[in-house]
């Protein structure tokens, strides 16, 4: 437990920042991409899908940005999440099960991509991003996160 000693304040502050980003990206997604779908679903399905979308954005926010944090707790979570995402994509033919679930529930095409930070910026419209650069980004940030965790 000494490994995480004196990390509590950083953990709280940086967690709140990641949660804020999660809420912003979730709001953009729901407002611009999945909102009509949510409105058309039955109430019980609507709430389940709403929370799935927010949880999905939380995982994406951690995977995309937590390597920038200095909290050892957040860096540990980042390493687990990022490694898990990379393994999941490799085992599921470069597709996310959560994105597939949302697409199916909303009647979206199977090829529809998750509207995360990189989608909003327009990177995901390029094949080079989806096929090569995203893996490099997540792998490099995983290594950076590991090094930060070791040397902080």
Image: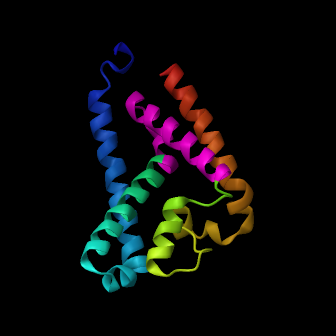
Quadrant of residue 126 within the rendered picture: bottom right
* Colour theme: rainbow
- For the stretch drawn in magenta, the main secondary structure is helix
Camera-nearest residue between 22 and 91: 91
Percent position (x, y) of residue 149?
50, 26
Residue shown at 74%/55% (left/top)? Answer: 132
Task: Name, please, the residue furthest toward the top.
Answer: 2
Queried whether the magenta region covers residue 64, the answer comes back as yes
Q: Is 16 placed above or below 5 here?
A: below
Residue shown at 42%/59% (left/top)? Answer: 57
Residue shown at 32%/43% (left/top)? Answer: 15
Question: Can residue 116 be seen from the camera position used here?
Answer: no
Percent position (x, y) of residue 59?
44, 51
Tag count? 0
Q: Is 64 placed above or below 6 here?
A: below
Residue shown at 47%/22% (left/top)? Answer: 152
Question: Can residue 46 be seen from the camera position used here?
Answer: yes
Percent position (x, y) of residue 114?
52, 67
Camera-nearest residue between 39 and 125: 39
Query: In the rendered view, does 27 fall on the left or right side of 33?
Result: left
Quadrant of residue 82 within the rendered picture: top right
Camera-nearest residue between 129 and 109: 109
Query: In the rendered view, does 148 fall on the left or right side of 91?
Result: left
Instruction: Please report the bounds of the magenta region as a residue range.
Output: 63-91
Query: In the rendered view, does 38 fall on the left or right side of 139?
Result: left
Q: Which quadrant would the N terminus be assigned to in this image?
A: top left
Q: Is 24 placed above or below 59 here?
A: below
Percent position (x, y) of residue 62?
45, 47
Queried whether the magenta region covers residue 87, the answer comes back as yes
């Amino acid at each position: 437990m000494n490994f995480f000693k004196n990390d509590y304040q950083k953990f709280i502050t940086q967690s709140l920042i990641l949660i804020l980003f999660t809420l912003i990206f979730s709001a953009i997604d729901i407002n611009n991409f999945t909102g009509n779908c949510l409105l058309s679903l039955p109430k019980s399905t609507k709430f389940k899908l709403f929370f799935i979308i927010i949880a999905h954005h939380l995982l994406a926010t951690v995977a995309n940005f937590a390597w920038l944090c200095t909290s050892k707790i957040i860096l540990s979570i980042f390493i687990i999440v990022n490694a898990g995402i990379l393994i999941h994509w490799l085992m599921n033919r470069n597709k996310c099960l959560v994105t597939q679930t949302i697409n199916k529930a909303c009647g979206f095409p199977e090829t529809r991509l998750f509207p995360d930070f990189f989608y909003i910026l327009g990177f995901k419209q390029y094949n080079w991003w989806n096929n090569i650069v995203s893996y490099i980004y997540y792998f490099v940030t995983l290594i950076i996160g590991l090094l930060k965790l070791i040397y902080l």
